[in-house]
Amino acid sequence: MSLKKADLIITDINYILTMDKSLTEFNNADIVVKDGRIIDIGKNKKDKYFGKTIIGRNKIAIPGLINTHTHAAMTLLRGYGSDNPLKVWLEEYIWPAEGKFVSYEFVKDGTQIAVYEMLRTGTTTFVDMYFYENAVADVIKQVGIRGVLSTGILDFPTPGAKTPEEGIAKTVDFINEYKNDPFVIPAIGPHAPYTCSPQTLKKAYEVSEKYDVLYHIHIAETEFEVKTVKEKYGKTPVEHLKSVGVLSERTLAAHMVYPTDREIDILSETGVKVAHCPESNLKLASGIAPVPKMIEKGVVVGIGTDGTASNDDLDIIGEISTAAKLHKGATKDPTVLNAKQALLMATRWGAEALRMEDKIGSIEKGKYADIVLIDITEPHLNPLYDPYTQIVYSSKGNDVDTVLVGGEIKVLNKKVLSLDKGYILDRACFWEKKIKGLNGS
Ligand SMILES: [Zn+2]
């Protein structure tokens, strides 16, 4: 029998958790990659192909993880002004620092720190909302990770645009520049219902429809927001956005901490997806999103870290671990959000939230070879009765050993290959000094 050529063969993987619709698993099996995609999976596949090989022994393979909501460049504000009331944190720390420093350079440096951490801990696709998304795109092109990028659009001047119209126009240019790019995936990002007028929300939605891009927005994050929207429009946030006409399968709603039962029905009926950010909601004391209820009602829920100023890390494995435990405690029911569901939030459900389930989110033939191998040789991962449980409750992002994005090796033996750690640390130090000088701390 003649061997077929492959670009990469990962052999003898102890567990392959495909996260496909049937949650198919393989033991002691191989994954074959060609032209950036998975072309074969199963036992003894290595005997049918030739090409570069990675040994998958003592590893669990899972799909590349998906962070459905972050503000990557905020790594530069990680730990800045923590443990203050929200108003103090925003008005005395975050906004002054952003107002003074956010620029192309700031976003580029901050995003490099974020991308390093994301790759190191197994994230292969992230959804971003910030300013100077062209800087984020430049980092992505240099490193090779996938990003769904949206410029934050607000009714007041931002570091990227003086008016919401300018923000929308810049987004349209960005969409045209990166149309059909497999790594930089443009989206539109109206910030929230309390920071965008109905006109801004609507205009942004028209762009989302015309170019068929994701409509990425914060919704119902805090009680303050719900109160503000109710006072202004006489409706709760989801009902208000429904009447404005911006809820559809294209809408990705970050947070959704305070939906009413009626609003959960609206999310389910309109096909809105939710980016659940439990650690940020906890750290900022926003509250606990009713995730088990939303899932039960058929709402697609992905996981997000939010920015590192309110998390303070980008470790998706840690995030699903928090989510799985948080909702058990909140509902007093240990069966809710089980380990499989928690991992689905970070994989296939995340892909569905981005409308990219035909390309990413599971280990299946034809999909992009975005694959993570977790090392299971450490004592804290043994004994091992169930690989899902072990990932969600025992492992940490740092147990990620190997990461492929589009079949390219980005992390190997726990080392990030395509970024210079020394340079990144220098830049972090540079910004730390500048931002420290701001409030004399
Ligand atoms: Zn956010």
Image: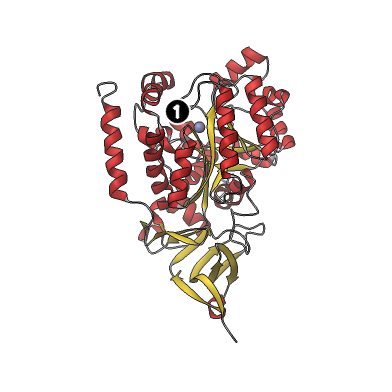
Residue 214: percent from left, percent from top: 63, 39
Q: Amino acid at mark 1?
A: Leu
Q: Is residue 259 left or right of residue 123?
A: right
Q: Is residue 18 above or below residue 120?
A: below
Q: Is residue 96 left or right of residue 144?
A: left
Residue 412: percent from left, percent from top: 39, 61
Q: Is residue 200 left or right of residue 89?
A: right
Any atom of ligand 1 within 8 Å of the CB at mark 1?
no
Q: Quadrant of the C terminus?
A: top left
Residue sticking out furthest to the right: 269
> Does the rendering let one see residue 406?
yes
Q: What residue sits right under mark 1 in the picture?
A: 284
Q: How many marks?
A: 1
- Viewer-proximal residue, 179 or 196? 179
Residue 198: percent from left, percent from top: 66, 20
- Viewer-proximal residue, 109 or 435? 109
Q: Looking at the image, which residue is at 47% across and 49% down?
A: 141
Residue 149: percent from left, percent from top: 53, 39
Q: Quadrant of the N terminus?
A: bottom right
Q: Is residue 154 left or right of residue 262?
A: left
- Viewer-proximal residue, 438 or 400? 438
Q: Is residue 212 above or below residue 50?
A: above
Instruction: Determine which quarter of the picture holds residue 265.
Output: top right
- Viewer-proximal residue, 43 or 377? 43
Q: Looking at the image, which residue is at 54% across and 67% down?
A: 33
Q: Secondary structure at mark 1?
A: loop
Q: Looking at the image, which residue is at 44% across and 71% down?
A: 55
Instruction: Determine which quarter of the picture holds residue 220.
Output: top right
The residue carrying pointer 1 sits among few (fewer than 14), some (14 to 19) or many (20 or more) residues within 10 Å by Cα, namely some
Instruction: Determine which quarter of the picture holds residue 202.
Output: top right
> Does the rendering let one see residue 306?
no
